[in-house]
Image (cartoon, rainbow, N blue to C red):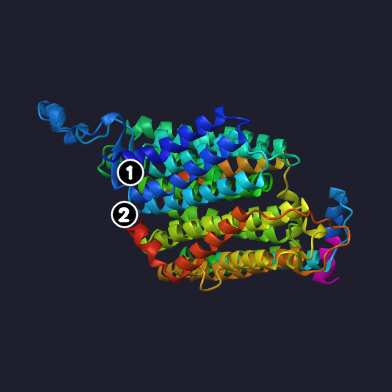
Amino acid sequence: MSLYDVIIKRIREIQEKAEEEEPITNVTASAMLTAELTLIASLLIAVVMIRLVHPGLMIILIIAISIIALMAMPIMPKLRIEQNDSFNNMIFYVVLALGIIIALFYWGSINV
Amino acid sequence: MNELIAVMVILPIASALFLNLLHNKDRTIKILAFITAIILPVIPLIATYGAHFFGGYVPLAQNMTIGQNLPSLITGTQLFQFHPGIVYLFNSAQQLMIFILCLIAFFAIFTSINEIKRPSGVYAFLMFMGTASVSAILLSDDIFNLFVFFEIAALAQVGIIVASGIKNNYETALKYILLGNIAGPLLLLGIALLLGITGNVNITDIIFSIKNGLVDPHSPVILMALGLITFGWLYASGLPPFHTIKSAVYSKALPHGAALLQAFSVFSMVAIGIIILRIFSYLPFSKTAIIGISLLAMVLGITMAIVQTDFKRILGFLAVGELGYIGLGLGLGTAFGITAGLFQAVNEAIITAFLFIGFGTVLYKTRTSDTRKLGGMMFINPRLALLVLLAGFAMAGVPPLNAFQSKLMLIQASIQSGLPELGMIMILLSIVTFMTFMKAFYTIYMRPKPAELEVIDNKIPKSTIISMVVFLLVCIILGLFPQIATNSLQALAAGLV
């Protein structure tokens, strides 16, 4: 099954979950594909900055993220489900972000 | 002392309160709102740079009457230098940003009083109150005063959503205020921790205490305060994890309201971001964190924008994505990078307001923002379509428009800072921004008009077209002569390094 087919299948699943009855158009599919590629490309380029910490770690992370991205593809439909207007999701990510920020700011400010 | 510095905040508050009393007096509201709104951008242009001490409470060192007769116990310590009252600082950067904010406020109010058949005093109240609050956030050198206006701005934003009358607006407003009930108190806790450890709420004095060893700069309390203030900053700006609600907020406001709301977010982000850099820039991780959060905002905002089908939501996510560029500039931490970030903030505020008002004309003619139901709008008004197209070009960074200059500066700054990867991501996301905009533009304007689409036969008000033309002119002027803005921003940026 090609990446395009996988994306179409995932969009159908999301539409079924959201009870949307709109047909899947070329515009919808190509938009999702663009978002998918942008997300992965941006992530991989961003990981290259880890070279400032350690070049070896950067290589390991790039390989690991490439493998995870390939296995988890397509990511964008899943991300879209998570980034919806549900208040429960919003609160979950807000609390998660608060925890990460406080932990990282304490640890990072002492170690970075 | 310059009273006009305080007038930038007092005038919009006074007019907001007065207009609120004039509910149902449509003509009077229109005239008064127009007069006040046109005065607002003029004040920062005629005010002189300096500080305004509320209540006349200058530091003892500057008070010749009291300062001379004090014992050495006071004159010999830092108490002599500290600021006892609320201080507003006004320099060239604040002048430019408040001018742009008030210009957007003027055109948002000007458009609203012409597009809405029965202008409401309450709606004008909210727009003026929000403008006053964000102006105060930009001016204030007192972190508690900033928090008070942060809360007022959040309430004004909720009010603007509620006043829109768009379907499900109450639900979005409620979600936004509930999330604010988490972020606001945590920001206040961060401020309280700083007050507890430094004994001050004046930002200059807090910095003095930290830099001169009066407190331990690596104290866990200060690190906790940094984390909490950063969390409040994310809410005020709409950076992740608040990007979803912020884009929903924009989509549930009327186009002129959304134009103003995004300007509030941009300038709140800049103001609080500057404070974070002023107080905490000695901690390298603060800049790393700003870069990380900004990257996340860019990637999530722009990738989510492209998969949306509602043009207001597309613009909302794009606006969040563009905030990431501003954050990257601030996070780079160099004078050039911060100047580029601030310039991008000025440009983004104008361009996004231009786009919201431009696409708002489609909503005005069709009463729908669903791109799947739209089409053929170019044949209905080709000149408006051209203006919207140029606004989209500006957002994507097409030369010779303003965002081209700021994005180019940001890319140069990232390369100079030894982080070319950030430049690559910015270029990639600018291309995707352009594609996202063109996708929306094609579906709304260029493809054949769907048979079931009803176009209302009402003429677009001239005020809307005037607003768009002025925004375009500002984009072209700042694109051709970027030094008009960058010269004003350089001093502030240099002071943060």
- Establish if B364 lies above or below B442: above
Verify whether residue B257 appears in magenta. Answer: no
Disc 1 crowd rating (10 Å Cα; few below 14, some 14-19, many 20+) is some
In the figure, residue B82 lies in which quadrant?
top left
Name the residue type under label 2: Gly
**Quadrant location, the C terminus of chain B:** bottom left
Instruction: State left or right for residue B68 relative to residue B195.
Output: left
Task: Tell me where the magenta segment starts and ends, as one range.
Answer: A1-10
First in residue order: circle 2 vs circle 1: 1
Residue at (64%, 58%) from the top-left corner? B358
Disc 2 crowd rating (10 Å Cα; few below 14, some 14-19, many 20+) is few
Verify whether residue A3 appears in magenta. Answer: yes
The location of residue B462, given as percent across then percent down, is 62, 55
The location of residue B390, given as percent across then percent down, is 60, 68
- Secondary element under disc 1, as helix, strand or loop, is strand
Residue at (40%, 70%) from the top-left corner? B416
Question: Which of the chains bears the disc numbered 2?
Answer: B
Question: Which of the chains bears the disc numbered 1?
Answer: B
B440 and B178: which is toward the camera: B440
Mark 2 = which residue? B495
Badge 2 and badge 1 both on one subunit: yes
The location of residue B433, given as percent across then percent down, is 63, 65
- Establish if B29 lies above or below B289: above
Instruction: State left or right for residue B398 relative to residue B147.
Output: right
Instruction: State left or right for residue B121 relative to residue B209.
Output: right
Disc on res. B5: none
Disc on res. B89: 1
Q: How many marks?
A: 2
Q: Is any part of residue B221 visible from this angle?
A: no
B416 and B142: which is toward the camera: B142
